[in-house]
Image: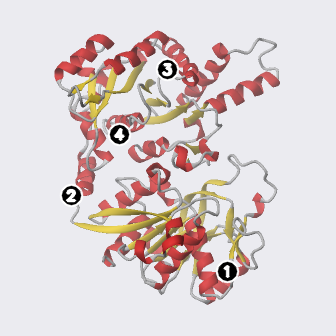
């Protein structure tokens, strides 16, 4: 087994997750079996209870683990199937250590960061390494080198390298090389200081990824090489990517990133087969058409809050030979100014998931606008519940219809709490999570799009379509075309008389890949193209 650890320095948001995912792509295309994981130093057990405006989206894995959005990059860029073992936080580490101490597992020893905390971190790597279907594990360490909370993770990696042999471990360090406008000069000192911090701990990077807005010439690379003790060719510029993030593997391959890593680890492989990837990138950056999609959300101020949805729209656009221009619309603005100002120029409306009652009426208004004006509509999770509420109020005549999440005294609770959620008090990791199977009506639009009457999709919700109202909705033209296998949960709704009105309780964006767009996103963009205005 070979191990690659990706760390970051100077500042956060350098794109080390993207660099790690791109490396995974390159190694897979060389015929190697790659699995990726993320270690995050924050004390939350997982990001499930964090605000999307602070931390970005919560990415849900097949087994229901709520994880960092970087795991979405990993699954989109590689084929490795991830589980809760591929995500570790300081919160999980300390929770494990304290439980062991309370259970007496340490036999009266004084519990300390070394060895007890570092052992838990190392054991997670060993546990993942037990799989016999992988050759390489790439582990990204969240945070920034020098942060107090990240020190136990870096110390664990130092120990781990000695235990498995340095010939089996490669360290990649991502840093910032800032450009000082007044001096018209790139500065290497932040990178030098960051690497010095790593070396204090006992870790020497084999490759330095230099994030920069300006080209890094050979003299700058040689300077970093000299002061950071890496070969000049292992100082790799990682400039801002234009067009699409899916250029990253191609850009890094052009600079021999994967060649250097393979040589460091003694891996003899053929050159990567990047033809399919290059063709996909070409479709994204050179489309024939453009279509405008209105995304009506609650967290639009932070782009990462809907990261997987934006990527899924990009995938679907490439499949339809179209550039998807996403118009981000705050649902609260629709409440204040009405829908026309924001929606009259879009060819499709997408309402994603969310929590809390802020902006809900704006989303209901947007769903009504799409339904009454024949604009393709795609609702995801809360977006499905919104569509049901709107239809119940304005077509079925159920005044005051609502979800009990937002109005516990509604006279028509068309959306209500899942039965198994009624006794749950804790908030973290307690929703209906992970992959669940669903059955589709054979004559439905979604069955045609999927090419199947059976699907498996990932969920993250507490509320559901109330079965008490299903017959009333269907009588007026809204069909429940997908249900859980036992028929107890409405999974997908359609309005057959509408050009495209589909909403789902699950999160299809978590299974879309650039080389395999999700069929529902692909169908939605295809329908929007036919309605371009």
Compare marks 2 and 4 and give the one earlier in the sequence: 4
Q: Position of residue 209 (x, y in %)?
A: 32, 27
Local packing at callout 3 (Cα closer than 10 Å; few below 14, some 14-19, many 20+) is: some
Q: CA distance from mark 2 to mark 3?
A: 42 Å
Compare marks 3 and 4 and give the one earlier in the sequence: 4
Q: Position of residue 100 (x, y in %)?
A: 76, 24
- Would you name the residue on which mark 1 appears? 470
Q: How many marks?
A: 4
Compare marks 1 and 4 and give the one earlier in the sequence: 4
**Mark 4 element type:** helix
Compare marks 2 and 3 and give the one earlier in the sequence: 3
- Would you name the residue on which mark 3 appears? 146
Which is more toward the observer, 179 or 91?
179
Q: CA distance from mark 1 to mark 3?
A: 56 Å
Q: Nearer the viewer, mark 2 or mark 4?
A: 2
Q: Nearer the viewer, mark 3 or mark 4?
A: 3
Compare marks 1 and 2 and give the one earlier in the sequence: 2
Task: Kindly check if marks 3 and 4 are in contact, taking CB atoms under 8 A apart as contact.
Answer: no
Q: CA distance from mark 3 to mark 4?
A: 29 Å
**Mark 3 element type:** loop
- Would you name the residue on which mark 4 appears? 25
**Against 142, is 338 above or below?**
below
Residue occupying image coordinates x 51% and y 32%: 132
**Does the image show residue 267?**
no
Q: CA distance from mark 1 to mark 2?
A: 44 Å
Task: Kindly check if marks 1 and 4 are in contact, taking CB atoms under 8 A apart as contact.
Answer: no
């Amino acid at each position: 087994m070979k191990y690659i650890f990706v760390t970051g320095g100077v500042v956060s948001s350098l794109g080390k997750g993207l660099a790690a995912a791109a490396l995974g792509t390159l190694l897979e295309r060389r015929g190697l079996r790659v699995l990726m994981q993320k270690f995050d130093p924050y004390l939350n057990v997982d990001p499930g209870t964090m605000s999307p405006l602070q931390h970005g989206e919560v990415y849900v894995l097949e087994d229901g683990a709520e994880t960092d959005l970087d795991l979405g990059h990993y699954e989109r860029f590689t084929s490795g199937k991830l589980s809760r073992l591929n995500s570790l936080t300081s919160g999980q580490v300390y929770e494990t250590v304290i439980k062991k101490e309370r259970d007496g597992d340490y036999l009266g020893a004084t519990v300390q960061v070394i060895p007890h905390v570092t052992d838990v971190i190392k054991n997670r790597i060993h546990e993942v390494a037990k799989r016999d279907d992988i050759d390489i594990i790439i582990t990204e360490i969240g945070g920034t080198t020098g942060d107090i909370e990240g020190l136990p993770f870096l110390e664990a990696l130092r120990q781990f390298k000695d235990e498995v042999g340095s010939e089996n471990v490669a360290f990649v360090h991502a840093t910032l090389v800032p450009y000082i406008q007044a001096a018209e000069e790139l500065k290497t000192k932040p990178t030098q200081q960051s690497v010095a911090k790593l070396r204090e701990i006992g870790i020497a990077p084999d490759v330095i990824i230099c994030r920069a807005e300006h080209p890094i010439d050979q003299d700058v690379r040689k300077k970093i090489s000299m002061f950071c003790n890496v070969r000049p060719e292992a100082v790799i510029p990682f400039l801002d990517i234009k067009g699409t993030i899916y250029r990253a593997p191609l850009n890094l391959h052009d600079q021999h990133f994967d060649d250097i890593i393979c040589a460091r680890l003694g891996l003899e492989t053929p050159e990567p087969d990047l033809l399919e990837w290059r063709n996909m990138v070409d479709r994204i950056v050179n489309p024939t058409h453009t279509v405008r999609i209105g995304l009506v959300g609650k967290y639009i101020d932070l782009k990462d809050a809907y990261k997987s949805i934006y990527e899924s729209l990009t995938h679907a656009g490439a499949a339809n030979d179209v550039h998807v221009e996403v118009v981000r619309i705050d649902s609260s603005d629709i409440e204040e100014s009405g829908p026309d100002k924001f929606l009259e120029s879009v060819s499709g409306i997408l309402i994603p998931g969310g929590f809390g009652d802020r902006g809900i009426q704006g989303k209901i208004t947007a769903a009504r606008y799409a339904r009454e004006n024949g604009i393709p509509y795609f609702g995801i999770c809360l977006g499905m519940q919104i569509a049901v509420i709107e239809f119940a109020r304005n077509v079925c005549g159920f005044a005051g219809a609502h979800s009990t999440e937002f109005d516990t005294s509604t006279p028509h609770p068309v959306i209500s709490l899942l039965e198994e959620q009624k006794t749950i008090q804790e908030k973290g990791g307690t929703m209906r999570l992970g992959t669940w199977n669903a059955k589709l009506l054979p004559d439905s639009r979604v069955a045609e799009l999927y090419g199947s009457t059976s699907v498996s999709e990932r969920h993250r919700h507490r509320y559901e379509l109330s079965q008490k109202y299903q017959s009333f909705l269907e009588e007026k033209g809204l069909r429940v075309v997908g249900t859980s296998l036992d028929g107890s949960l409405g999974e997908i709704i359609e309005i057959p008389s509408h050009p495209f009105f589909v909403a789902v309780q699950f999160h299809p964006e978590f299974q879309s890949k650039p080389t395999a767009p999700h069929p529902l996103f692909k169908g939605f963009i295809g329908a929007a193209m036919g309605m371009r205005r």
